[in-house]
Image: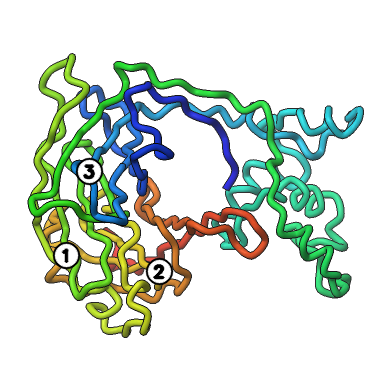
């Protein structure tokens, strides 16, 4: 994935590098009833199970203008490397299609979008004889790479500059503090309802079961209320998804752990991420996350583990992101495209 914009938060939002531990992020309406979309950030990590309380932050999602955040790798009137690196890519068609369209297709294809995207796009458009549509050298022209070349491929330096920084105003951010009923607990999995009314959290554990929690209503009742303590209650207990699915579990128990979650935009499914891949549950009723314990999850989409997962806005795609860099040193976003038969459409 490419960074498109840094976001500055109000001072009262705890930084993840301090005594907080930001683990997951979700998207839903803001709690003020305005209909605006918020990014919901879960400060719920606690490896030592030693924290007194945990936090969820909601901040108004800023606009991101793709016209000015990418460099143009194909500009022909460059004067030197530094000037070329600073130019912005206009959102326009060029050759076989615009760069941004190509980026989207790369993400959907499973090839991934690394920080070498500009170079690959240039190769795909300008030299189709030697490079395929992904910008990879065709097999008949490949030579065995030297160790130095392999090391170079692992580098992942930023290929974009002059990003527009967005700021969140103090009255566009909300803080919810909570405690678990039975004390401190570690978690990395969080999701918020599309209308911003409640959130869910799943415990991260290597035990035979993981607790599922649901918050009370988050909707703002006072226009000046930007900090509130909110109760959470346990609503379910999950067996390890690898076991509940019938697919079998790896020997290493850490692979069983739930590291991310999301609830479908229409509320009839929920997905959890583990180090052993994602698993999807069908809920008994829309947003009835408590019913996950009685559902048989479906897995096997991919055995690639990750730390986080989310549904696309249309509910037809799952997106997962690993915590560690991939083999070429870049952070990849992996899309999983959903397919339905005519009788399975929601």
Secondary structure found at label 2 = loop
Q: How far apart are marks 1 and 3 (CA)?
A: 16 Å
- Where is mark 1, residue-wise? 292
Q: Nearer the viewer, residue 226 or 109?
A: 226
In the rendered view, would you say 220 is above or below 342? above
Q: Nearer the viewer, residue 185 or 155?
A: 185
- Mark 1 Cα shell of 10 Å, populated few (<14), some (14-19), many (≥20): many
Numbered badge on residue 275: 2
Q: Which residue is drawn at 77% across and 62% down?
A: 151
* Mark 3 / mark 2, whichever is N-terminal: 3
User: Which quadrant of the figure contains the C terminus?
Assistant: bottom left
Left/right of residue 60 with respect to residue 332 in the rendered view:
left
Q: Residue at x 62, y 53 (%)?
A: 113
In the rendered view, would you say 126 is above or below 209? above
Q: In which quarter of the image is residue 257?
A: bottom left
- Where is mark 3, residue-wise? 193
Q: Nearer the viewer, residue 284 or 325?
A: 325
Left/right of residue 115 with respect to residue 205 in the rendered view:
right
- Mark 3 Cα shell of 10 Å, populated few (<14), some (14-19), many (≥20): many
Image location of residue 186, percent across then percent down: 26, 55
* Mark 1 / mark 3, whichever is N-terminal: 3
Left/right of residue 118 with respect to residue 295 in the rendered view:
right
Q: Quadrant of residue 82?
A: top right
Secondary structure found at label 3 = loop
Q: Which residue is drawn at 44% across and 57% down?
A: 320
Image location of residue 269, percent across then percent down: 24, 59
* Mark 2 / mark 1, whichever is N-terminal: 2
């Amino acid at each position: 994935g490419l960074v498109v914009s840094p976001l500055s938060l109000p001072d009262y939002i705890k930084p993840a590098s301090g005594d907080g531990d930001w683990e997951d992020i979700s998207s839903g309406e803001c709690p003020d009833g305005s209909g605006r979309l918020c990014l919901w950030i879960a400060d719920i990590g606690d490896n030592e199970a030693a924290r007194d309380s945990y936090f969820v932050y909601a901040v108004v999602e800023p606009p991101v203008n793709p016209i000015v955040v990418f460099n143009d790798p194909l500009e022909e009137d460059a004067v030197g490397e530094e000037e070329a690196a600073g130019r912005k890519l206009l959102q326009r068609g060029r050759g076989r299609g615009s760069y941004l369209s190509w980026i989207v297709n790369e993400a959907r294809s499973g090839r991934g979008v690394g920080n070498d995207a500009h170079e690959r796009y240039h190769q795909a458009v300008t030299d189709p004889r030697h490079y395929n549509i992904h910008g990879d050298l065709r097999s008949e022209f490949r030579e065995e790479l030297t160790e130095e070349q392999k090391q170079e491929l692992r580098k992942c330096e930023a290929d974009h500059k002059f990003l527009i920084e967005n700021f969140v105003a103090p009255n566009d951010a909300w803080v919810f503090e909570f405690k678990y009923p039975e004390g401190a607990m570690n978690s990395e999995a969080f999701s918020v309802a599309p209308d911003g009314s409640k959130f869910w959290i799943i415990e991260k554990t290597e035990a035979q079961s993981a607790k599922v929690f649901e918050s009370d209503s988050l909707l703002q009742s006072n226009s000046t209320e930007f900090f509130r303590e909110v109760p959470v209650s346990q609503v379910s207990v999950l067996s390890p998804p690898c076991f509940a699915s019938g697919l079998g579990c790896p020997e290493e128990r850490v692979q069983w752990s739930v590291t991310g979650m999301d609830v479908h935009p229409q509320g009839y499914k929920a997905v959890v991420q583990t180090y052993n891949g994602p698993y999807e549950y069908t809920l008994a009723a829309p947003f009835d996350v408590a019913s996950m314990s009685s559902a048989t999850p479906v897995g096997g989409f991919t055995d690639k583990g990750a730390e986080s997962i989310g549904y696309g806005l249309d509910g037809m795609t799952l997106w997962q992101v690993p915590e560690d860099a991939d083999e070429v040193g870049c952070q990849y976003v992996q899309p999983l495209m959903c397919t339905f038969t005519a009788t399975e459409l929601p």
